[in-house]
Amino acid sequence: MIKIFGMPSCPSCEYVKRQVEGNPEFEVIDIGKHVRNLKQFLALRDNNSAFDEAKKVGDAGIPCFVLEDGSVTLSPKDIGLEPMPEENAGTACRIDGSGC
């Protein structure tokens, strides 16, 4: 099962979530729903190089995808999903509040 970490207030996360609804191969984890989920995500973000570029540019790093082998990617394409269309890409939220 592929884990997807995100939040409903993140447009990119919701775009991905709609693509996997009802598919048992994916588990969507809302990092804002419980502190346990947030801690799990932060442990990934703080210790995985997949987030290095996202952190450099001020992105939160969601949605993120944890594959069955434990590897992490921030690219929906890597798991066979479509990324948010370019015309909507500016709606992604950054830590500094831009893009929201």
Image: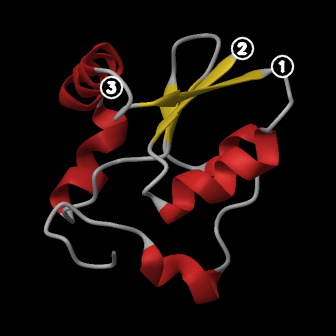
70 relative position to 57: left or right = right
Q: Residue visible at 26% across and 31% down?
A: 45
Quarter of the picture holding the N terminus: top right
Q: Which mark is residue 58?
A: none
Q: State if disc 3 and disc 2 touch (CB < 8 Å).
A: no
Q: Label 3 crowding class (10 Å Cα cut-off): few <14, some 14-19, many 20+?
A: many
Name the amino acid, label 3. Answer: Phe
Callout 3: helix, strand or loop? helix
Q: Is residue 73 above or below residue 63?
A: above
- Disc 3: which residue: 41
Q: Depth-wise, is mark 2 or mark 1 nearer the camera?
A: 1
Callout 2: helix, strand or loop? loop
Find the distance from the CA under tag 2 to the CA under tag 3.
16 Å
The residue closer to the viewer here, 83 or 6, is 6
Q: Residue visible at 25% across and 45% down?
A: 52
First in sequence: mark 2 vs mark 1: 2
Q: State if disc 1 and disc 3 touch (CB < 8 Å).
A: no
Q: Is residue 26 above or below residue 77?
A: above
Quarter of the picture holding the C terminus: bottom left
Q: Residue visible at 68% across and 43% down?
A: 78
First in sequence: mark 2 vs mark 3: 2
Q: Is residue 75 above or below residue 73?
A: below
- Disc 1: which residue: 24
First in sequence: mark 3 vs mark 1: 1
